[in-house]
Amino acid sequence: MLLWIPLLPFIGFLVNTSGGRRLSKTAAGAVASGAMFVAFLASVISVRALVLLPAEERELTQRIFTWIGSADFQVPLGLRLDPLSAVMILVVTGIGFLIHLYSTAYMVEEEPREYARYFAYLNLFAAFMLLLVLGENFLVLFVGWEGVGLCSYLLIGFWYKNRLAADAGKKAFIVNRIGDVAFILGVLLAFTQLGSVNFKELNGLIAGFRPEETFGVVSAIALLLFIGATGKSAQIPLYIWLPDAMEGPTPVSALIHAATMVTAGVYLIGRNAVIFAHAPEVLTIVAVIGTATALWAGAIGMVQNDIKRVLAYSTVSQLGYMFMAMGVGAYAAGIFHLLTHAFFKALLFLGSGAVIHALSGEQDLRHMGGLKKELPITYWTFLVGALAIAGVPGLAGFFSKDEILYRTFAAGHPLLWTVGAITSLMTAFYMFRLVFLAFHGERRTDAEAVARGAASRLPATHEQHHDADNSHPPHASHLHDAPRAMATPLVVLAIGSVLAGYLNVPAALGGSAFLEHFLEPSLQVPAVEGMHGAAEHASYSLEMALMIVSSLIAVAGIGIAAFLYLKRPAIPEAMAARFPGAYQFLVNKGYIDEAYDAVVVQPIKSLSEHVLWKADATVIDGAVNGMGQIVAESGALLRQMHTGSLRLYAVSVLFGAVMIVGYYLWS
Amino acid sequence: MAFNLILFYLFAAIAVGTTLLVVVQSNPVHSVLLLIGSFIGLAGLYVLLEAPFVAVIQIIVYAGAIMVLFLFVVMLLNAPREAIVRSSMLESGATRAVGALLALAFAAELAWALTRSRTLAMSHAGDTPAFSVPQIGQRIFQEYAFAFEATSILILVAMVGAITLAGRHLSKNDQGHNG
Amino acid sequence: MADLNHYLILSGLLFTIGTAGVLLRRNVITVLLSIEVMLNAVNLTFIAFGRFLGSSDGQIIVFFVITVAAAEAAVGLALVIALFRHVETLNPDAFRQLRG
């Protein structure tokens, strides 16, 4: 049964790839969405079967065949369902299905072949992601890991004729790959030093160790895995691909870069919580990097003008929160935030997609406004998502983010808590800046730009090109609210953004902390003295106090955004003018891309071109051509023996005969 | 017997003499006829060596068939007498010196080989019966059967080759081909 | 009594004469004839050894050698005819197209 979960989307991929030419758009979309829906059902059935088992034995394994079998190193293609992967598969299949549904309407203007190709890739991605979370050992996980990286490349660069999209796809893949080198090294280290790549075996083995005080094998493994996770989950230093990935279609951004693929790094740490728990120094690094990333991305997100870029940096920032949680030992809180974030971030992205679609490709916030009246469903669902991410009490984001902050504080990291709180303020601020700029007020369209269809100073998106090519009368035909296929997922996700939080209401508020207890068998982090874990016995009153603080921060952020963008819209521009250096620094993303380019990319390019290419041309080509030269020249030399004179030939035969006979007579 | 020795020297003289003349003659027709004389000398030697079968074969096949073929070709080609021209490079001093040296080396090797080896006395006539034709035939068709078959294929190949090489390839445009 | 050495010296002599003919004559037909002379010298050697070693192998081999010599002469003469059609001479030095 477990095998069906990744297999169904894979079959969808096969159908759409091979038959894509001949399927109508409806059929292609139906196949893909249907595969996801059935996979979702299969997941529900499997999870139900899991839940029926007693808590200590919650594990379903299915081994399909022996992939690597050499002496005592046996690696099967094995799938394992336990509470952690149960949460993940429900998220992937459920939200994945909704996004497939949304895409059937969003991508409807593509050619049938492109349409089918899109859904093929999307299904393939889902298959790999499910393989990733269901894998029972590092190697199966890695297959999924690489597979989702590949699909990310394919989908970001879906409109491959657009140079920016193609470049963004390459960037994503290459940066991921850099992280993957560390990942592989970590797995190899685990294999050579500890003898296994199976999660259960490794966890069992390491649980018996003492937590490492110095940097030992376990710490090395943990660090390497974490570096791999920074690549996949866009943390410092490998986050640079995610903002560029916004060149891809918006549903792709929603699925891959909000809800699923980028969470693979968080999942990895959760899956190997035991390893990380025994490597306290690495956990510190994880927490610090997570927090730093959250702050940094939040700061950049505050000044971006492209609606999708704001959301992209927001994703990086929220992922930072998840890593912060993992780093302080609150693994369940990190997974909880993963779950709630999947809901509201997907919602926000899909909502922004509806906005972009309605405005025929406009993505610049400075040219939006007043959409509240024209796109009501989009507006209200978007608002729910924004409230959730800001951490307004009652919605999902409040519960998960608060849990993280509380645990951070309780584990004795007031500095990290402070940074987290500041980032919360930023989150609320930039999110509502986006809401107010896009939906409230009056439309600030640039009239000539509208006529030309490619006005914004942002790089032109495909949607704008698309419309320019088809010479749509701009704005007139698309300015309608989301069609049913797009609106339904929005509504469902909005409901989820509200309700998902109630899966883990903390005890302080009288809840049962269901998710945390559910995940315990998977995370298996016992509270041992001296461990870097979250203290279990902090007082409820501290928790309540911190909750109130978070709520105030959220409201404050919204308030500041309302003030600056609704009441006194002139102030933000004035502030930008007052601090031009800082403003430019943030708008240009801290010039990090340029720095990487100068320090890493250009040296490699010049090394390749000037040294290696020259070496190749002179040495290797020289050797090969030289061989030919030698043969030709020696041939020319030897050719002089062919005088063409028969008698000379006869003489030489005789000469040879004399020599040979002489040799035999002498010896 | 001394008679044998005299006969040996007689036939040997015939053979060597005619062979020398073959190589020296300028008229190819004379060369061919002299070669037939050389064969007769050799046939006599073969008989002395108690191989009458081979001697007869030599005369019939070699002298009778091959030399006749040579004669045909010589007369067909109406070969001119060989002109004595001494201008080619191969007759230059250096070449002649090298050639003479080579010949000397060759002769020395032969002499050396011959004088160093043991001499085999000719066995008495009674000990070794002359090999009769049936005996030879049996050996050919039993031990040397493969060689026999291979030689027959060789003859076939030679026939086809000769016809292909020397035959006139008449095509429509090729009427006045000279032969 | 003529012993083996006599025969061998005789055969060597004939062989040398034949070689000289091959190398020195400038008439292709004569060259071919000289080759036949060389083959005959070899035949004599075979028969002589066959007699003195008491085996009929010598005669059998000569049997085959004569056959092969016939085939070779036929093909050689066919070549000469073919060549003669192109260049109206029998001088081997005239055929230098294989130079280089």
Image: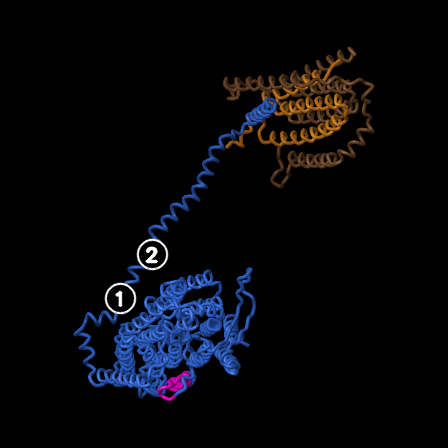
In this rendering, the answer to whether A525 lies above or below A595 is below
Is residue A180 rendered to the left or right of residue C94?
left
- The correct choice, above or below, for A641 with respect to A18 in the image is above
Q: Does the magenta stretch include residue A418?
A: no
In the rendered image, the quadrant that contains the C terminus of chain B is top right
Residue A593 in the image: state x and y as whole percent: 30, 65
The stretch drawn in magenta includes residue A493: yes
Residue occupied by mark 1: A591
Q: Which shade is chain C?
A: orange
Q: Which residue is drawn at 56% across and 70% down?
A: A64
Q: Where is residue A443 in the image (x, y as percent from the top left)?
A: 26, 83
Asked whether A169 or A192 is in front, the reply is A192
**Which chain is indicated by disc 2?**
A
Between A405 and B132, the one lying in front of the other is A405
Question: In the drawing, what numbered circle is on residue A604?
Answer: 2
Q: The brown chain is which one?
A: B
Quarter holding the N terminus of chain B is: top right
- For badge 1, the amino acid type reads Tyr
- Mark 1: give few (<14), some (14-19) or many (20+) Cα within 10 Å: few
Q: Quick check: can you spot residue A327?
A: yes
Q: Which of marks 1 and 2 is nearer the N terminus?
A: 1
In the rendered structure, are the residues bearing label 1 and label 2 in contact, judged by CB atoms less than 8 Å apart? no
Q: How far apart are marks 1 and 2 (CA)?
A: 19 Å
Task: From the image, state the color of chain A.
Answer: blue
Q: Is the magenta stretch mostly helix, strand or loop?
A: helix
| Relative height, residue A301 to residue B131 (above, below) | below
